[in-house]
Image (cartoon, rainbow, N blue to C red):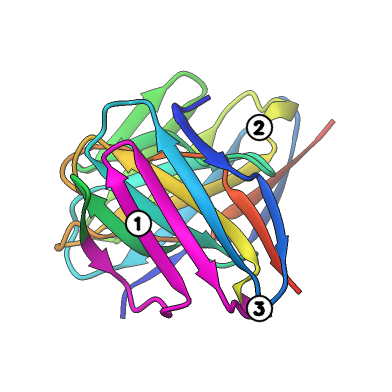
Amino acid sequence: ETGVTQTPRHLVMGMTNKKSLKCEQHLGHNAMYWYKQSAKKPLELMFVYSLEERVENNSVPSRFSPECPNSSHLFLHLHTLQPEDSALYLCASTPQVGRGPDTQYFGPGTRLTVL
Amino acid sequence: GQNIDQPTEMTATEGAIVQINCTYQTSGFNGLFWYQQHAGEAPTFLSYNVLDGLEEKGRFSSFLSRSKGYSYLLLKELQMKDSASYLCAVRDSNYQLIWGAGTKLIIKP
């Protein structure tokens, strides 16, 4: 238990569906992250939020839309996804964005399958 | 481009010692991390190195040589529960984390 929860843990959706992934951190951190993890590939950073403000967007397709209503909650809205978007989506948090030995606290991930 | 290399898979025996290597080429360096990820679970922090040398934490140690762009994670007295993927990540000059693809460690009795 890392203090970061994600729902749902598993999601199967068709290419025309709209769904949302939810992340919540109970650590009092100010920065939250979305990562994509595909088999045998490095973690891909998708979005970074610091105090509810998006500070980074790594050329992610517009079919992925993040939302950060407050510093404890992060959403990833999904629409018209492609089969290659099937992956494990990990949420993480840190006390602040990117300095020093701040370690990433990860949630358990959402295993997404796009049919 | 920026790159982190680590072996895809390693196998070791329970009770033995294993060393997982990580080499990196990044624009700048602001620290190197090792994370452990059990199948179907979240990655969890193991170690952080920013200066050259060895950091020891119980059965796990991590070594860094900045001049060689090289690190290793040393696991002693291996236990079955150590079967997991081990992720190496480097923070570059922009404080971005660059991740390796992970090394899957299989422990055999």
Residue B65 x/y as whole percent: 28, 51
Disc 3 with disc 2 on a shared chain: no
Measuring from the top left, give residue B63's x and y in whole percent: 36, 41
Instruction: Please indicate whether residue A27 sits to the left or right of residue A108 in the image.
Output: left
Disc 2 from disc 1: Cα separation: 36 Å
Residue B59 in the image: state x and y as whole percent: 52, 22
Of the pair B92 and B12, the residue shown nearer to us: B92
Residue A42 in sight in this render: no
Callout in the foreground (3, 2)? 3
Residue A16 is labelled as 3
Task: Give the position of the C terminus of chain A as an image quadrant.
Answer: bottom right
Mark 1 lies on a secondary structure that is strand
What residue sits 25% from the left and 53% below the top? A49
SS of the residue under disc 2: helix
- Front position in the image: B55 or A106: A106
Q: Residue furthest top?
A: B58
Residue found 67% across the figure and 56% down from its top: B9
What residue span does the magenta drawing correspond to?
Answer: A55-84
Letter of the chain that mark 1 sits on in the rendering: A
The amino acid beneath tag 2 is Asp
How busy is the neighbourhood of tag 1: few (under 14 within 10 Å), some, or many (20 plus)?
some
Residue A100, x across and y down, in percent: 17, 40
- How many numbered discs, if any? 3
Do callouts 2 and 1 point to residues on the same chain? no
User: Circle 2 marks a residue in which chain?
Assistant: B
Determine if the magenta segment contains residue A72.
yes
Q: Is residue B107 visible?
A: yes
In the picture, the disc for residue B82 is 2
Residues behind callouts 1 and 3 on a single chain: yes
Q: Which residue is mark 1?
A: A67
